[in-house]
Each structure stands twice: as structure tokens, then as C-alpha cells.
């Protein structure tokens, strides 16, 4: 044994050396180097002479990264995806394929993961594509990538992504907030959706969930809304765009895209047609806007919208508090607006609401937005079965003023109400009125009561 | 005078090797050869007597210091940069992943080895006179190892780190009166945050390693002063054991018999201090029972070092150190678990916060420290100390069982869930 000690020592030293070489080999031969070499070979094919060929082939292998402090990320995707900005790589195989229609979202400013998902810091495929445990944002499947537009463009229409606005509209009108909180407003029965796009981004799951909640999460208290496939897709898009992630000013300045269609919406909302005409159609208190758009530069128009007094002291035009992109949108719309546009806007114009009507309208919207319709019905007809409650179903609200005073109704909305049971021996009724104090402001609740009473009035008149 | 030669001599400080004086000075002036005595007992070197667990623990510490210093070049103790640095180590830094794996696995290994070392010392009765105080230092070193591992646990700043430390420090806060204060002092606030990360970092890379190094030195020094590595003296033949002398020890403990004073030999300060030194074990064994430290002890220790390094490297090549999502105080995993070595403690806490989290562990540590002073039985022969062995075995088994239950049998809500049952919907 004694004599064999040095031999043993030597053998072990060799093993340590071998392990060390193994570690070095493991560290020195990452997959991205292989990809870069392959890319260099692809590039070399196009080179005219031997010198240029060898230059390309012997180019240094380096990790490429886009530092994006404004998006709080570092993306190393272009270490392997080398042809992203090279149009000659249009037909190259992945990971070298050219990314068409990239501008203005160039990798240097936007990276890749903010739209595509995945793990930007990683340098091997599995980790980079985020298909590993403990990474919450795996690569989005191709058909859902457009949903990411909504992470920065949070308002208005995004050109080419109608699903986002549709999804938002559905969310606000189908009573989703009755159960779900979003940015601090909403109920607590379902999960908070504020970060839904930042965590657990499984679009297929979301879409199936919208089509039939129980199919993917058993015993989910979420009712089946019988959404169409398009609606489910739109809601999924909207969910994927939800994140409270702080984007840098450069990115958040484009919350909405200044499209002509959004400009038209604003034009209607601000009631410009009340003073102005387009192509001779409309009011004549102010100048014709088609003319104005032709005569002045967008910069001039922008200044005019910010402060009309600056250019024409004494102008009767009010200064609207519009953000940059809203002004841009209106100017874009003005540039393309025609007399037909003015005609259709005029024909759709409704009478301005009185304050009282406005309160009722707001109450109606809250009624839809916070899910009252889920139990009481879109026409307030009630009728949702509620076994062992008196009457056996959720009450209709059409006769609220017969049984209650307005103050009593406000109290019920504030504090909730457990329906009286029919038979005390049987289990209590499953549905009950939850308290809304913590979700709705007193003002909201009074408006909802106003809305209910407004319907009552119509009935009396009849 | 040749200044170059002067400088050279100031460094090597010995005469040329061509002279006899130079040859002997090569040995006399070599610090490495003086960490050990010139000769050691053959018996001491046997693997089955110590399993070299103390050495292995120390070598793991060396691996940890080396890899830890290397990792420090790439680490910023700030949230959330710390997490990004972990990702950079994994994806960009040359050998970064390997270094981190080594550091992580060696740390776990050290906790295990230091515990096994303690068991070995107990079962061989090596904590007995004159080594009582070295046992106490050993217990402190064990606690420091846990402290180093615990402070290091937070540094990756991922979910695993954040919640393990949150749970771990919560356990500490159950101590009456001072608990909450200590937690606040440790975290630099009421919750685990950036200041906690900085404090844990400083403790992990400066305070605790320095304490560890100092106490390790004392630990080794005491081992050498108290007669070298442990060995089963009770197995020596009668006549040999008769030659073992314990000078100055109380008569009651002189079970190993005394020899005539004429054969006495001590390492005390003769001629300077009168009286006999306390607790000085002196071997009167024959020359043939000892061997030179170099090469016999050196090669064996070298082999222990190589086996340790080989194991750590091999494990690190094939198993990755865990790294979960970025720490998120808003998202509590269910169940949130402390580091594995505190899971026995967490299991106790789940039954009673004060009793399990404070009283029992405090008593356990105090009892561990007091073992050499409570145990008045002078014999190291296992047959003579059946009850001590039974009691300690019970302590070990209870610890291991609690840790296994906490690690593998506790699911969401700390409910009993066997590891083979998969809970759907649990994250």
C-alpha cells in the first residue's frame, strides 16, 4: 500500500486533469459558436474573391447583445439569429432567416424578447427559447406574436392587430371586472389579471379557457360565456398584452399609434364638426379643415392644437388637452378626411347628453363592466337559476323601485345581500349578491341606482 | 555585496543545498513541513479510524474559497442585478456555470461532511480529555458552516433564495424579546430586500470566512497539541497502552495507567516553567509505531484532497446548480421552504413556533457544546459508553428524519404529501 500511494496520487491527479479539460471543453464549445461558423460559411458563398471569403470565414466569434435599459432587458438573440437585419438572408434557414417588416422595431432599439418572448440573456436554444423550468415567458407561438404589440401600444387601435382592441372592448363590456382585477380595479373572485401577459404566457391554454373554462381548469367558477372562436382569440390577445412592466419613456410615448382611424374617433369624441367643416360639409364657425391641412405643415397644426392662442391670439378654439399621439392621429385624419367623412360623422352625431343622462349612461356602463349582467341579465330580466332562494332564481331588477327606495338599493349594492332561503333544511342558495364597496366608488354605485331608476321611469310612462 | 544574491537569500533564507547545513535547513525552514510534526503515528493514518472527514471538510472549504473568490469577480450584491449576474455566469462567463456548480455542491457537501465529522468524533469518544474545548470549537465551526451556507443561499436572488431566506429568518424571529430585533438587524429592514442582500453578502464573503479561518487554525492547532489525529487507543495491546501516559491529568482519569517517571518526556517549557503541564499527552511508543509525516501523511492527505476535488468537479460537470425565477416578493411559492439543512427546524416550527423554533434548537446546541463536560466517563471504548452512543444516535436519527420529512414529505400548506404523489395545480 505504502509504495502504491504515489501511483494512486498520480492517477487521481490525472482524473482531476481530465475533469478540468472536460469543463474547459464544455465551456469552450457552446452551440452559438457553431451557429456563427455556419453563418460565416453562408456569408462566404456570396463573397466575390478568395481574400474576402477567408476574411468572412475567419471573423471573430462573439456574443452579440442589444442592451435595452428602457425595456429592462438584454437580448442576445442576434448571437445566433445573425441574418435578422440582412435582406440577402431571406431564404436562409433558421436561425439565420431575415426578419421582414421589422422597421421601425429594429433590434438595436427593441431587442427581440419584448415581442417574441423567450429568455434574452440565454445563449443556447433551449434556454433562449424559454422552454425550460423557471422561465415564465417562453417564445410565443407564431400566430400570437402580434399580441405583444399591446404591451407598449396600450390604447386605441394597433394597425394589423384588430384583436387587441376587440379583446379590450369585450373585457370592458362582458363584466370581466366583476370577478377580475385589472390595474387595481375589479373584483376578487377570479385571479388578478394585471400581470397576465407577463406570467404564465400559455396562449393555447388561455384560448381554450375562454371557449370553455371548465375544459382546462376543472371546477373553475368562471361561467362559460359561449364566446365565438374570434372572441376567444381577441381576449387571448388582450390577456397576452397585459403587463405592468415599466417601459422607458421612449417606448411608453407610443402608447397609442397615431392612425387615421383613431384620429377619426377623437374627431368625433371632441365634436370638432360642431365648429369646423371638411370639404364644405359641417359647421362654418371655424375654418374648413381640409383646407387647413393642405395649407399648413403637420408641425404647425400640432402647435395649433396645443395652444390655439399662440398663433391666433383671441381665437375661439379651446385648447384641448391632447397627448402627442392623439394630436398626431387627428392631424393624420385631417390630411385624409373628405366631405363624405364629414357627412357620415354628422349623420351619426347624437345629441349631447345632459348631465343626468350622462350619469345614467355611466351607470349602465358600470353595470356591464363589473359583471352585474352575469346574474341579472343584459335586459335586467334576472332569471338565472338559484336553487333554494325565494323564487328559485336571481331576481329581475326591472321592478326595483316598487320594492325599495333608492337609498336601500345603494346599501344593498354596497354591502351585498344573501337571498332569503325557501327551505331552511336545504343548503343555502349558491348565488348571492357580493358587497361592492371595495370595488366601486359611492359615485359609481349611485349612478348604477340612477340607471335602474331610469328604466323604471320608462315603465311608469307606459 | 551582490544585492541580487542578498534579495534571493532573504527569500529562501537557507544556505546553498551543496552544504549539509543547507540540506537540513531545507526541512527546518519549510513552513509546509511544519504544519505537521516530523513523525506521526502509523495508527493515526488509517482511513477507517477517521475517514479523513475533517480533512475533506477543510478541503471543501478550500474549494469554496477558491471558487467563491472567482465568482466574486462577476457578482454585484444588488437587486435585481445579482440575478442577471447569475444568468451571465450561466450563459456568458467562461467556465462560469461550472464554477457556480462547484461552489453550490461543495457548500452542500461541506454541511454534510462537517456533520459526519462531528458524528465520527462523538462515536470514537475523541472529544474527551484533553480535547473537550476542541469539541466546542468544532461545534462553533459547524454553526459557522451553516451560517456561511445560509448567507450564500440568498445571493442568487431568485425565488428559491428569496423565500428560503424569508422562511429561515422568520424562524429566527420566534425567539422571545430579541428575535424580531435580530431579524431586523440581519435583514436591515423588516423584509428581505436589497439591504438584506448586501448584509448577507458581506457576512458571506468577509465576516464569516475570516471567523471560520481563525477558528479552523485553532481547531488544527489543538488537534496537534492534543496528540494528533484520533485513533482507537482502546484497541492497542495491553503493553502498548500501558506505555501511553497522560501527564498531569487528574488521577481519576488515569485509566490508561502510568509509567515510571524516568521514561517521562514532555513538550512543556522545561527549565523555564516549573511544574508539570496540564493536559499534555505524551507518547512513549516505540520508534516502529511512527512514520515520517513526509511522505506518508502528506500523500494520504493529498489523496483525500484529490478525491474531494474529483468528486466536486464530476458532480459539477453533470448537475447544474438550481436557479429559479427572479425573486418576486409578491408571489409566494407554496410551500415556501427554508434551505434543506433547516427543514428539520421548519418541521419543528410547523408544530410549535416557540418550542420548535427556539427552545428545542437552543437546547440542542447548548447540549452539543456541553457534551464533553457532561460526559464524565473517561473511557473511549464503545462498550463502556453504550448510553452515550444511544443518546447521540437518537439525536442524529431524529435530525435526519425531520429533515427528510421536511424536504420530501411536505407539500402545499405544509400538508403531509408523500413525494410520489403529484399534486395537480400546484406550482
Image (tube, grey):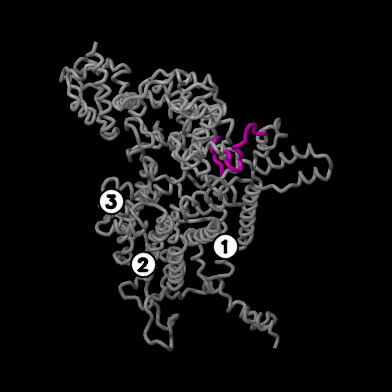
Residue interval drawn in magenta:
A98-122
Q: Both on one chain, marks 1 and 3?
A: yes
Q: CA distance from mark 1 to mark 2?
A: 28 Å
**Where residue A421 sits: x, y (%)?**
17, 20
- Under circle 1, the secondary element is helix
Q: Residues within 10 Å of mark 1 (few under 14, many from 20)?
A: some
Q: Position of residue A396 (x, y in %)?
A: 25, 17
Going 54% across and 40% down the picture, which residue do you hit?
Answer: A119
> Which x, y percent locates residue B277?
38, 80
Q: Residue furthest left?
A: A424
Residue nearest the viewer, comparing A334 with B327:
A334
Question: Are the residues flagged by discs 3 and 2 from a single subunit?
Answer: yes
Q: Nearer the viewer, residue A61 or A4?
A: A61
**Chain letter behind tag 2:** B
**Which of marks 3 and 1 precedes in the sequence?**
1
Residue at mark 2: B128
Q: Nearer the viewer, mark 1 or mark 2?
A: 1
Task: Give the residue at mark 1.
Answer: B302
Look at the image and say whether residue A115 sits in the magenta stretch.
yes
Q: Which residue is mark 3?
A: B356
Categorize mark 2 by other alpha carbons within 10 Å: few (<14), some (14-19), many (20+).
many
Please, what secondary structure does the residue beneath circle 3 have? helix
Left or right relative to B307: residue B80: left
Between the C-alphas of marks 1 and 3, the distance is 42 Å
Amino acid at each position: 500500500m505504502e509504495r502504491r500511494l504515489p501511483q494512486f496520487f498520480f492517477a487521481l491527479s490525472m482524473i482531476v486533469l481530465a475533469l478540468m479539460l472536460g469543463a474547459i471543453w464544455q465551456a469552450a464549445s457552446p452551440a452559438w459558436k457553431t451557429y456563427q461558423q455556419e453563418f460565416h460559411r453562408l456569408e462566404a458563398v456570396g463573397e466575390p474573391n478568395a481574400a474576402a471569403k477567408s476574411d468572412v470565414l475567419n471573423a471573430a466569434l462573439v456574443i452579440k447583445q442589444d442592451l435595452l435599459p428602457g425595456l429592462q432587458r438584454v437580448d442576445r438573440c442576434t448571437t445566433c439569429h445573425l441574418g435578422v437585419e440582412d435582406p440577402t438572408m431571406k431564404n436562409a434557414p433558421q436561425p439565420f432567416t431575415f426578419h421582414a417588416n421589422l422597421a421601425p422595431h429594429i433590434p438595436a432599439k427593441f431587442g427581440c424578447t419584448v415581442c417574441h418572448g423567450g429568455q434574452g440573456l440565454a445563449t443556447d436554444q433551449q434556454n433562449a427559447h424559454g422552454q425550460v423550468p423557471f422561465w415564465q415567458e417562453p417564445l410565443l407561438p407564431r400566430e400570437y406574436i402580434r399580441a405583444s404589440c399591446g404591451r407598449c401600444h396600450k390604447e386605441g387601435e394597433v394597425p394589423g392587430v384588430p384583436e387587441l382592441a376587440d379583446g379590450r372592448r369585450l373585457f370592458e363590456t362582458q363584466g370581466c371586472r366583476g370577478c377580475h382585477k385589472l390595474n387595481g380595479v375589479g373584483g376578487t373572485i377570479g385571479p388578478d389579471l394585471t400581470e397576465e401577459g407577463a406570467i404564465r404566457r400559455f396562449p393555447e391554454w388561455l384560448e381554450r379557457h375562454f371557449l370553455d373554462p371548465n375544459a382546462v381548469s376543472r371546477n373553475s367558477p368562471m361561467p362559460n360565456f359561449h364566446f365565438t372562436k374570434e372572441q376567444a382569440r381577441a381576449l387571448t390577445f388582450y390577456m397576452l398584452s397585459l403587463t405592468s412592466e415599466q417601459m422607458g419613456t421612449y417606448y411608453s410615448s407610443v402608447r397609442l399609434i397615431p392612425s387615421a382611424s383613431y384620429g377619426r374617433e377623437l374627431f368625433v369624441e371632441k365634436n370638432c364638426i360642431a365648429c369646423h367643416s371638411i370639404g364644405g360639409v359641417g359647421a362654418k364657425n371655424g375654418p374648413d379643415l381640409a383646407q387647413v391641412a393642405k395649407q399648413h405643415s403637420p408641425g404647425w397644426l400640432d402647435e395649433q392644437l396645443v395652444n390655439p392662442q399662440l398663433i391666433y391670439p383671441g381665437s375661439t378654439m379651446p385648447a384641448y388637452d391632447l397627448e402627442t399621439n392623439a394630436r398626431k392621429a387627428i392631424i393624420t385624419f385631417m390630411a385624409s378626411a373628405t366631405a363624405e367623412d364629414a357627412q357620415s360623422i354628422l349623420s351619426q352625431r347624437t345629441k349631447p347628453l345632459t348631465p343626468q343622462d350622462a350619469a345614467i349612461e355611466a351607470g349602465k356602463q358600470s353595470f356591464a363592466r363589473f359583471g352585474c349582467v352575469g346574474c341579472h341579465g343584459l335586459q335586467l330580466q334576472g332569471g338565472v337559476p338559484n336553487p333554494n332562494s325565494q323564487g328559485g332564481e336571481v331576481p329581475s331588477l326591472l321592478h326595483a323601485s316598487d320594492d325599495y327606495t333608492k337609498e336601500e338599493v345603494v346599501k344593498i349594492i354596497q354591502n351585498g345581500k344573501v337571498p332569503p332561503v325557501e327551505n331552511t333544511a336545504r343548503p343555502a342558495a349558491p348565488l348571492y349578491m357580493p358587497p361592492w364597496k371595495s370595488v366601486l366608488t359611492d359615485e359609481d354605485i349611485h349612478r348604477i341606482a340612477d340607471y335602474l331608476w331610469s328604466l323604471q321611469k320608462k315603465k311608469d310612462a307606459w | 555585496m551582490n544585492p541580487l544574491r542578498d534579495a534571493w537569500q532573504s527569500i529562501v533564507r537557507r544556505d546553498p543545498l551543496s552544504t549539509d547545513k543547507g540540506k537540513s535547513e531545507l526541512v527546518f525552514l519549510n513552513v509546509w513541513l511544519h504544519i505537521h510534526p516530523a513523525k506521526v503515528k502509523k495508527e493515526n493514518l488509517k482511513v477507517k479510524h477517521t475517514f479523513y472527514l475533517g480533512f475533506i471538510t477543510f478541503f471543501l472549504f478550500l474549494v469554496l474559497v477558491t471558487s467563491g473568490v472567482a465568482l466574486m469577480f462577476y457578482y454585484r450584491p444588488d437587486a435585481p442585478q445579482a440575478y442577471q449576474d447569475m444568468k451571465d455566469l450561466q450563459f456568458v462567463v467562461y467556465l462560469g456555470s461550472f464554477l457556480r456548480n462547484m461552489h453550490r455542491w461543495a457548500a452542500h457537501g461541506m454541511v454534510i461532511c462537517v456533520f459526519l465529522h462531528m458524528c465520527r468524533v462523538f462515536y470514537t469518544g475523541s472529544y474527551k480529555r484533553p480535547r473537550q474545548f476542541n469539541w466546542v470549537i468544532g461545534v462553533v465551526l459547524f454553526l459557522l458552516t451553516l451560517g456561511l451556507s445560509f448567507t450564500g443561499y440568498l445571493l442568487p436572488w431568485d425565488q428559491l433564495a428569496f423565500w428560503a431566506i424569508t422562511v429561515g429568518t422568520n424562524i429566527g424571529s420566534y425567539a422571545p424579546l430579541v428575535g424580531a430585533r435580530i431579524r431586523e438587524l440581519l435583514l436591515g429592514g423588516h423584509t428581505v430586500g436589497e439591504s438584506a442582500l448586501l448584509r448577507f453578502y458581506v457576512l458571506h464573503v468577509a465576516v464569516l470566512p475570516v471567523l471560520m479561518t481563525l477558528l479552523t487554525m485553532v481547531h488544527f492547532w489543538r488537534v496537534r497539541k492534543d496528540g494528533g489525529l484520533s485513533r482507537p487507543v482502546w484497541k492497542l495491546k495491553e503493553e502498548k497502552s500501558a506505555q501511553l501516559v497522560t501527564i498531569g491529568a487528574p488521577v481519576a482519569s488515569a485509566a490508561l495507567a502510568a509509567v515510571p517517571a524516568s521514561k517521562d518526556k514532555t513538550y512543556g517549557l522545561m527549565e523555564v516553567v516549573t511544574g508539570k503541564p496540564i493536559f499534555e499527552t505524551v507518547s512513549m511508543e516505540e520508534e516502529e509505531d511512527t512514520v515520517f509525516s513526509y511522505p506518508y501523511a502528506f500523500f494520504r492527505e493529498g489523496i483525500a484532497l484529490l478525491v474531494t476535488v474529483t468528486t466536486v468537479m464530476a458532480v459539477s460537470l453533470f448537475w447544474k446548480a438550481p436557479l429559479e425565477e427572479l425573486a418576486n416578493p409578491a408571489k409566494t411559492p407554496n410551500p415556501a421552504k427554508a434551505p434543506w439543512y433547516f427543514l428539520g427546524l421548519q418541521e419543528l416550527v410547523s408544530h410549535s413556533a416557540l418550542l420548535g423554533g427556539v427552545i428545542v434548537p437552543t437546547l440542542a446546541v447548548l447540549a452539543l457544546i456541553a457534551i464533553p463536560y457532561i460526559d464524565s466517563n473517561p473511557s473511549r471504548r464503545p462498550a463502556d459508553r453504550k448510553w452515550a452512543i444511544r443518546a447521540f444516535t437518537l439525536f442524529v436519527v431524529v435530525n435526519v428524519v425531520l429533515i427528510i420529512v421536511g424536504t420530501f414529505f411536505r407539500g402545499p400548506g405544509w400538508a403531509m404529501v408523500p413525494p410520489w404523489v403529484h399534486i395537480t395545480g400546484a406550482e
